[in-house]
Each structure stands twice: as structure tokens, then as C-alpha cells.
Amino acid sequence: MSGNKIPPHLYHRTLKRYSRENTMTILFPLIGLLLHKSLALISPPNPVRRVHSQSNFARHQLHRVPLLPSKSSNFPYSTSSNRPKSNHVISPSFFSESNSARDETSDISVADSHEETPLTVAIAVGITTSFIGYAYSKLMKAGFRFFWKTLPSAIFEKSTGGGPLHSLRSLLIRYPQAYIVLLMTFGAFTVGTLSTCYFPDMFSAHGYVEVLSQEGANSDGENKMDKFPGARGVLIPVLIMSCLTSVTGFSLGPEAPMVCAGGLAGVSLARKYNEYMSIKSKSNAAKSTNSLEETLAYAGAAGTLTGFMNIPLAGPIFALEMTCRDAGISSGAARSWTAAMAASLAGMVFVRGGFDAASNLGGHFTYASKAGVGVLNGIEMVLAGLGCGVGGALVGTLFHKTVRFLKSVLWPATTSPCPPRSKYMPILKQTLVGFLIGLLSIKFPQTMFWGEGSLQCAVDGQCTAFASTPHGIPSIMTQSAHVDPNLPFSSHNSPITAALQVGVAKFLAIAIATSVKLPGGVIFPLLSNGASFANALVSAVTSVIPVASSSLLVPTIIMSFMAATLTSITRTPLATVLILALTSSSWTNLSAILPGALLASYVSVWVSNFLSKESYFNYSDSI
């Protein structure tokens, strides 16, 4: 053997080995490409992700050039300069989209390729937003305690001398019910002034739903997530105004503001994260964070709901279901599932393990008697679920049509320029509406507040006195009530009429406050409203069909009607049932009651879509 010549037997052995390696190097990319195309036919991914991934795959193959030795070549294990060239190099033109994809994705960041959001980022967002929700709950409790416990105690119990407020105090002592009207008028005036003069373009849950329900970019190529404002100048005003609306007595809840605040915080953190990654990678290209912002908007909403409501599973599912009107979730929500769950669980660990570690877990709303377990057969469950689903859809459809009608009356569309004096008309309208709702609340104190604290009173037909609930107000203020909130419906001459009156009054209080654009949500207000109508339905059913005391038909009807009323508005059937289940006490036989409630929730959404193409929220991809 002279020079670098290889013996024939060694050359053929090497050739076979390199032929196998070269064959595998060619076959594996082909198999991967076929699998990629097959999966694309089954579940087509986002075009940006498909182009981005294929261009990376093509560029990867450029650096894997297989070598096939020839007889005249040198030994293949020599230096790289002596390695022979191969005739089986995979050209980048083999991939038809790779060359154009490289140009199309040059400006696209990794965050916008619909790759999975880093788990650490979702956890950080969950911890941050859950603290926002927890702090907001403490703020609401402090506000309620000040306006409805401390201040009334100072006015009605402690003696004061003369002064400019002496005459006002004397009037309130003589007419204590007037305190409700004065406080609700003050709340409406303050919120109206802030929203009109200082924050006229306030972001709300309606904007959250409208933006995230849109699939892809706008027709003009505009990034939909650009409609989310920065959290710095919007987050605090949203929380303050919604808190003031709720604690001054209006029947609007904090859940929608929590969704809005969490979405704003999540989007802002996504933008900060993308800026950090751009600086770290030393890239000067314009970055688009559409996918990351969308995912962290859902994660932020899940975190705030978890921190506020202490329900880790229902919070993220509610935030994900909320942006689809068809009892499902959108494709963007599906991509954000893992991040939303991670944010919710991280928020739960942070809040329940740190700030609220001593409090007991579990719900506290009781739907059934504590005396026995109770029974429910299949036909009762099916009839209750179907009937309550249709009934809840009718109530929900009537509600959003009433809100749209009132908005068209209070805020008529006009193209003519408004005179300068009309700038203050919204303040006047909101103040007047606050005064009218205050008068309604004197006759029906059950309509006050967002309903979570007094929900037990609504669930059991006022067997639990309104004054004994966390949202109970001094009994001196409820003396003029048309239906005494501290007496059961069954104690009235007509339980059906009493329950219907309370239900209609609550319905009007929610619809009017919403139509005048006071910030707040409708989750627990509508659950409470549904409970009042359900008690009227129970009174009507039991007066015709005798129901055994051990039957679970009554609690099934109540929970099912509550769920159906809410889902016909929010289109969140699974999350609603989870909210009701996770807030129920251990006395509630959920294994028997939940199937009917779940049936009613989905039936309500489907019937609502059949009854009206319009809905409470505006969905970008509406049918």
C-alpha cells in the first residue's frame, strides 16, 4: 500500500457504511416533510408558523451535506480539506417555500411563530396578575365596609354637634333609606365625571372579547393586539372606577374588570418580554408579538380571576371561553390553554400559599337541605336541565336586547358636531340613572351590590336573611322594602309573586346600570338574578307537582336556572358550572345536581344563538 491508497476491501466496507448513512440522511428529511404535510392536512397550523418552521428546516439541511466517497478520493476520515464532494446534496430549492419563507420571516420574532409560550413567562404573569386580583378583593371589602358599615354607624349611632353636616345628618336619621339614594347618586356622579373628563376611552371587557375573538389580522393587515392599550395609564383607572361602582351599591360585579385588568397586564408584560428578547438577541428588526400578547392576555385574565375568586380551574376556562360565542373556545384560546392554566395555578399557589394561607378552602353556598342526602332520578334531571336551559336563554336574550334598546335611547348615534355644553351630558345621565336605581333599591334592597356576598339569600329563597349575609346593610335602611329581604319568600301571601318581583327588579337594576356605561361585570349579578327567577319557578312547580322533601329537584332547578341565565349572556357554559360547583358547600350533592346544570348551560347557549344573532358582547367572528 503506497501513499494514501485504500485497500479494496476497506474501501467497499467504508462505501457501504457511508451509503447507509447517506440514505438515512436523505430519507429522514423526506419522512419528516411527509409527516409535516400530513399533519397540515389534518389540522392546518397558522401560516406564519408553517412558513417559519419550513424555512428553518431548509436552512438546517444546508449544514448537513452528506458525503459519498469515490474510488479516487482520499480516506474519508482524513482532514476536512481532503473530504470528497457528494452528488447527493439536498438543495434548498427542494423545499418550494423555503426561499420565500426566509424573506417573509426575517421580521418575525420567535414569539410570533405560535410556538409555546415559555412556562416561566406564564408563571410570572400568573403571579403578577393574581396579586392584582387579590389586592382588588381587599380594596372592595374595605370600600364596602367603609360605605355601608363605618359611615352609617357614624351617622345613625354616634351623636355629633352642630355644623354644616348637622342638617344632613338629621335628615338621614329621619329618613335612613335616603342614605342609599345619596350614596348611589354620589357613586354614579363620581364615576361619570372620571370616565367623561379624564378617561373617555376606557378599555373594558367588551374590548377584550372583541379583540381576542378575531382570528388572524385585520383585512388591512393591522395587528389586532395593537388595540390593547398599555397598562400604565389604564389599569389603575379601570380598577378604581369599577370598585367605586360596586361598593356604592350598583348591581355590577368585579369579574369583568378583572378580566380586563388581567388582559391589559398580560399584554404589557408580553411587550416588555419581547423588548428584552430583542435587546438580548441584538436584533434591530421590527418585532411582532401578536401570538405572545394574545397568549399572555388570556394568562393574565386567568391570573386575576384566580386571585380574586380563589377558583383556579374556573378562572382560566372562563377567560378562554369568553371570546367564543358558540359554547367552545377560539383557536387563539386553544393555543393559550397551557399558559392560562399555568398562570392560574401559579397564582393560586402564590395567593393561597402566601397571602391567604390561614383561610379554609371550599365553597360556602348551600343548595340543598342539610338534613338529608337527597335523591334525583334521570327524568327529573333531564326535564330540569332542558326546561331551565330554555328559560335561561329567554331571560338572557331579553336582557341583552333590553340593554341594546336602553343604550340606543341614552346614547343615540349622531354625526353632527356636539356643542361644548353636551360634553357634560354623560355625567348628567349617569347621575340621574344612579338616583333612579337608588330609588329602586329602597323598595328592593335585594338588587343592591354584585350578588356574591348575598347569593345565599337568593339561592335559598331568602331563608337566609339579607342582613346576615356579608353584603347585608343595617335593617333601618330596609324598612321601606316592598318585599322584605329578611323574610323567606314562602312567608309571603304569594311566594311566586314575591320572587318574581325581586327577579324583575334585579333584572332592571343590572340592565339600567350596564346601559348607562357604568364599569362592572354581570357574572354574580346574573347568577343572583337567575336564583330569584328559579325560586319563582320552584314555587310554581311545587304548587302543581308535589315534590318529596328528600328530592334534589329543587336545588337542581335553582342551580340549572342560575347557570343558564349567565351562560346565555357570557357564552361560558363549562366555566359557569365550575364556578357554581367550586363555590358550593360540602352539603351540596354535586354528583347529582351538576349533570342537570351542565345540560342547562349548553342548551342555553344553543337556544340563545337560535333566538338572536345578536349577543351581549360583540364578537369579531360572529355568525
Image: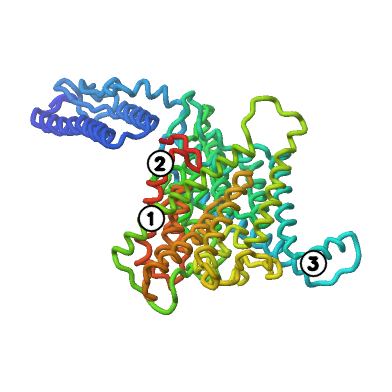
Q: Which residue is mark 1?
A: 600
Q: Residue at 53% across / 32% down in the picture?
A: 282
The picture quadrant where one finds residue 39 is: top left
Q: Give amino acid for label 1.
A: Ala
Display colour scheme: rainbow
Q: Amino acid at mark 2?
A: Ser
Compared with 189, 595 (above or below) is below
Using residue 119 as the reference point, say whether residue 93 is left or right of it: left
The disc placed on residue 330 is 2
Q: Earlier in the sequence, mark 1 or mark 2?
A: 2
Residue 25 x/y as whole percent = 22, 32
Helix, strand or loop status at disc 1: helix
Tag 3: amino acid: Arg
Q: Is residue 600 visible?
A: yes
Q: Which dot marks residue 174? A: 3
Identified at 44% across, 43% down, the residue is 117
Instruction: Tell me where residue 173 appears, x and y as whole percent.
Output: 79, 67
Q: Which mark is residue 578?
A: none
Near-viewer residue (379 or 74): 379
Separation of disc 1 and disc 3 at Cα? 48 Å
Q: CA distance from mark 1 to mark 2?
A: 22 Å
Q: Nearer the viewer, mark 2 or mark 3?
A: 3
Residue 452's place in the image compared with 334, above or below, is below
Q: Which of pointers 2 and 3 lies earlier in the amino acid sequence?
A: 3
* 484 vs 15, nearest the viewer: 484
Instruction: Identify the residue at the far right of this view.
Output: 162
Under circle 3, the secondary element is: helix
Residue drawn at 29 percent across, 21 percent down: 96
- Whether 38 is drawn above or below 563: the answer is above
Q: Residue furthest left?
A: 9
